[in-house]
Image (spheres, grey):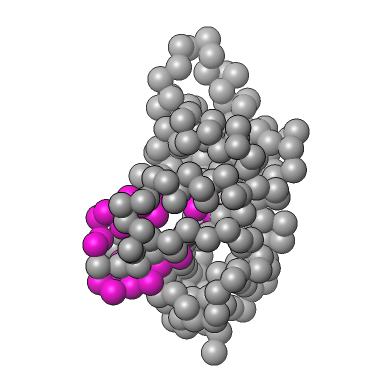
Amino acid sequence: MGTSSMFRDTTRGYDSVESFLFDRILRKLAAPLHAFAMARIEPLVRPGMRILDVGCGGGQLALDLARRFPGVQITGLDLSPQQIARARRGGASLADRVTFVEGTAVDMPFPGGAFDLVYSVGSLKHWPDHARGLRECARVQKPGNRLFVMEGDRGCRHEDVQSFIASWDLLPPLRPLAVAFYRTTVVGQSLDLEDARALLAALPELEGSIERTPGLPAWFLDAKTTHP
């Protein structure tokens, strides 16, 4: 999962400094979002599955999933070579079941129907073409299988942001600054709930729904691939 900024091009990969900061600081702050995503992904996993993590970052979710389910093969895809390098180092002991590949979500280096389950957490805002990225997710997944995507909500409710920020264990005077940081820097260039729903409605390759994440400033997509 990544962060976007009003001061940077969100469609480029993380550099070495950004990768370090994400792994050491921002990953911990995003823990409630990751916990929700894992709770939704886990019930979809079956032995022998080939799973794709789109925008895997430093590989934390992919590696966590691999440890919980020893009978699956997982591929992580990310645009940043620095993040891929970190993921490979962190997953060295699982290299027989977890592979990390450098590449873009809008032109994935995989054949059609290569995966049984595809998910993406906090990455969609980095894709230069959201619709094309979701079509690629559908293309590389077997027909009729599930796709899970979670992203920060640009139009998130104030109470959800406040609850999320409270989990950061900040001093009270710093919380308003953290709320502003999340709204402008993290989700300022993301989609709001209605934009995301309109995006899904325009994609015949996917059939499902987009809902607000309960108690969190994010939305999630739960869909099935419908392509022939």
Comparing 138 with 12, the one in front is 12
Q: Is residue 114 above or below residue 157?
A: below
Q: Check if residue 90 falls in the magenta segment.
A: no
User: As drawn, is 164 to the left or to the right of 94?
Assistant: right
Residue found at x 42% / y 46%: 89
Asked if residue 135 shows in the view, the reply is: yes
Looking at the rendered structure, the number of numbered marks drawn on it comes to 0
Residue found at x 39% / y 64%: 74
- Residue 23 in the image: state x and y as whole percent: 47, 36
Q: Is residue 111 above or below residue 91?
A: below
User: As drawn, is 132 to the left or to the right of 156?
Assistant: right
Residue found at x 70% / y 50%: 11
Give the residue furthest to the bottom.
228
Question: Quadrant of residue 206 in the image?
Answer: bottom right
The residue segment tinted magenta is: 44-70
Which quadrant, please, contains the C terminus? bottom right
- Residue 148 in the image: state x and y as whole percent: 46, 62
